[in-house]
Structure formats: structure tokens, C-alpha cells
Image (cartoon, rainbow, N blue to C red):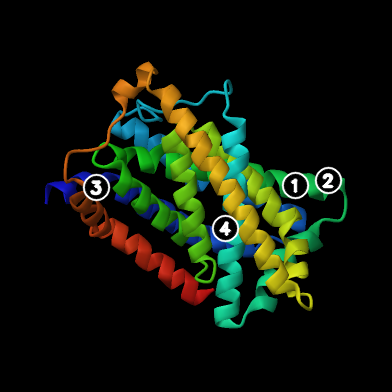
């Protein structure tokens, strides 16, 4: 019961955000032009993720970031960022390819991947895409899911916090077919924050992944769908995935070794002994959390 009570405030914030996301889906459909749609999306990202989070921090009288996290430009672990970006885009592509094969929906995945490119006709529309679908969502979503939500669960147990926030991050996109790849991405973004203790790192990775998905993934998917493409593509993707994964593990060890002498480690927490299961179940069984997941399932069915 104690864990359930502690998990209620962030779950209520989550439910509010999911309700706003559901309403925003209807507002986005009312946009008449492509540029109007992009502008509407930027405004909605701020209204949905950023403003409720700021009010939540004000009401709860808590800092925006967890005491062990920072938001610093220098120094940045550039090799770690590049390696984790590679793991995320390659892993997500492999997961989506597997889902497409299992559901016989490869062409639908390809059409979905290339749909945004059709709206880019000039430099202005390209900039609109970059800001509205890449930069602003990366900042807003990371601020909410990793900056606020992950921090709220972290003091109870950071591993449970990673799972709880990754599940709702995937569910917030209201797409059942892409749920596995979004869950994978959410786990890696939370991992990036836990390793580097710098919220800017997952923001940069998230932004880079968004750019890749819009400007590179459609062409990669075309290669995959070409004759003899899937087998060759999977072989290359798996090899590159393992190479980047090795780089992530190598850099993680280096970062943790350096972190041993960092004063911030005194503020870090790994939760009480045996707190993983109580924190996870308390979060999952929290009524607002369950309602938010139910709302996501409803939106998937409706759209």
C-alpha cells in the first residue's frame, strides 16, 4: 500500500498527459496545411509535456531534475552518444522488420516511414519538419519521461523506474505495431540518463533518432524490401548493431570508472534492498497508471 501511495502523484501526472495526447490527436487532424500541422505539433508538444510537468514540480515543490542528474553541455560523452544512437536505430529497425515479417505488413511499414518525406517540398518545410518532428518532441518528451517521471520513481528503485517509464513512453505513441521498438528506445534513453547523469544526452540521442527515422529510414526500408534485400540487410544490420553495442559497453565502463570520483555519486540512489518488485507492482497497479494504459489501448483501437 505504501508503494502504491508513493506512485500515485507521478501516475496522476501521467494520466493528465495521456488525456492531453488523446485530445491533441483530434486537434492535429483539424490542421488544413502541412506547415500548419507542423506548427500545431510544436505548440501541442509544449502544452502536453512541458507545462503540466512544470506545474507538477511547482505543486510538489520539487526540483525539475533529480538531485543526481544535471543538464550540462560540456563535457559530453560523444563516443557514448554515437554508439548508443547506433544501437537504438539499428535495434529499432531490426525489431520493426521482425514485426513486419510476423504480421505481413512490410509494405505498410515502408509507407509509414516515407509519408513525412512527401510533405517536404522546400527548405522552409524541411526546417518545419526538423523543428516540429525532431527537435521539439525530443526536448519535450525527454523532459517529461526522463526528466520528471523517471526521477519520481528513481528514489524508490531506479531499475523499476526505467521499466515503468519505458512502458508508458512506448504506449504514449498509440501505435501497437511500433510498441516493441518504442519500448526498446525508451529503455535505452533511460539507460543513457542513468549512465551519464545528464539529461542533455538522451535529448540529443532522441533528436538524432528522429532525424534518422524521417530522412534515412525510408531509404533503408526500400533497400530492405528490394529483391534479396531482407537477408542481406539483416546480416549488415546485426553486424553493425553488435559493433555499436560493444562501443556502448566500453564507454559505459569508462564513464562509471570516472564517475567513481564524482561528488554527485553521493546523491545517487539504487533504492532500498528488495524494493524492485514492490516499486514496479506499485507503479503498475496504481489506478491512474492503469487508466493511462487503458486510454492508450483505446486510442490504438480508435485510430
**Mark found first going from the N terminus, 4 or 1:** 4
**Residue picked out by circle 4:** 91
Q: Is residue 86 left or right of residue 273?
A: right
Q: CA distance from mark 4 to mark 1?
A: 27 Å
Q: Of tags 3 and 1, which is closer to the observer?
A: 3
Among numbered discs 3 and 2, the one appearing first in the sequence: 3
For the residues marked 3 and 2, what is the alpha-carbon distance in whole angstroms?
44 Å
Q: What label sits on residue 117 in the rendered view?
A: none
Q: Residue at x 47, y 29 (%)?
A: 255
Could you give the CA–CA distance between mark 2 and mark 4, rounded to whole angstroms? 32 Å
Give SS at disc 2.
helix
Q: Quadrant of the C terminus?
A: bottom right
In the rendered image, which quarter is residue 214 located in?
bottom right
User: Which class describes the residues within 10 Å of circle 2: few (<14), some (14-19), or many (20+)?
Assistant: few
Q: Who is closer to the viewer here, 137 or 13?
A: 137
Residue at x 61%, y 70% (from the top left corner): 97
Asked if the residues shown at circle 1 and circle 2 are in contact, with their CB atoms under 8 angstroms apart, the answer is: yes
Q: Position of residue 170 (x, y in %)?
A: 47, 59
Give percent across and percent down for residue 9.
27, 45
Residue carrying label 2? 124
Q: Residue at x 16, y 41 (%)?
A: 273
Residue for badge 1 = 128
Crowding at dot 1, Cα within 10 Å, few <14 / some 14-19 / many 20+, comes out as some
Q: Which residue is mark 3?
A: 7
Badge 2 or badge 4: first in the primary sequence: 4
Q: Earlier in the sequence, mark 3 or mark 1?
A: 3
Q: Among all residues in the image, which is located at the extreme right?
A: 122
- Of circles 3 and 2, which is in front? 3
Q: Nearer the viewer, mark 3 or mark 4?
A: 4
Q: Secondary structure at mark 1?
A: helix
Q: Secondary structure at mark 3?
A: helix
Amino acid at each position: 500500500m505504501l508503494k502504491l501511495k508513493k506512485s500515485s502523484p507521478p501516475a496522476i501526472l501521467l494520466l493528465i498527459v495521456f488525456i492531453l495526447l488523446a485530445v491533441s490527436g483530434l486537434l492535429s487532424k483539424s490542421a488544413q496545411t502541412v506547415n500548419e500541422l507542423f506548427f500545431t505539433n510544436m505548440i501541442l508538444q509544449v502544452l502536453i509535456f512541458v507545462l503540466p510537468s512544470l506545474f507538477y514540480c511547482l505543486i510538489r515543490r520539487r526540483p525539475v531534475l533529480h538531485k543526481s542528474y544535471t543538464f550540462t553541455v560540456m563535457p559530453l560523452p560523444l563516443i557514448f552518444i554515437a554508439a548508443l544512437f547506433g544501437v537504438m536505430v539499428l535495434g529499432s529497425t531490426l525489431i520493426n522488420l521482425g514485426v513486419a515479417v510476423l504480421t505481413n505488413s512490410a509494405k505498410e511499414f515502408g509507407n509509414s516511414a516515407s509519408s513525412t518525406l512527401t510533405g517536404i517540398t522546400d527548405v522552409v518545410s524541411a526546417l518545419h519538419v526538423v523543428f516540429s518532428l525532431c527537435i521539439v518532441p525530443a526536448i519535450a518528451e525527454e523532459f517529461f519521461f526522463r526528466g520528471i517521471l523517471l526521477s519520481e520513481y528513481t528514489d524508490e528503485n531506479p531499475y523499476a523506474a526505467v521499466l515503468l517509464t519505458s512502458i508508458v513512453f512506448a504506449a504514449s505513441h498509440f501505435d501497437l505495431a511500433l510498441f516493441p521498438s518504442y519500448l526498446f528506445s525508451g529503455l535505452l534513453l533511460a539507460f543513457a540518463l542513468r549512465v551519464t547523469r545528464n539529461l542533455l544526452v538522451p535529448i540529443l540521442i532522441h533528436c538524432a533518432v528522429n532525424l534518422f527515422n524521417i530522412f534515412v529510414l525510408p531509404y533503408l526500408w526500400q533497400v530492405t524490401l528490394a529483391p534479396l534485400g531482407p537477408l542481406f540487410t539483416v546480416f549488415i544490420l546485426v553486424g553493425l548493431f553488435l559493433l555499436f553495442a560493444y562501443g556502448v559497453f566500453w564507454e559505459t565502463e569508462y564513464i562509471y570508472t570516472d564517475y567513481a570520483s564524482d561528488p554527485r555519486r553521493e546523491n545517487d540512489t539504487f533504492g532500498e534492498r528488495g524494493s524492485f518488485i514492490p516499486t514496479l507492482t506499485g507503479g503498475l497497479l496504481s489506478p491512474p497508471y492503469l487508466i493511462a494504459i487503458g486510454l492508450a489501448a483505446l486510442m490504438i483501437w480508435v485510430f
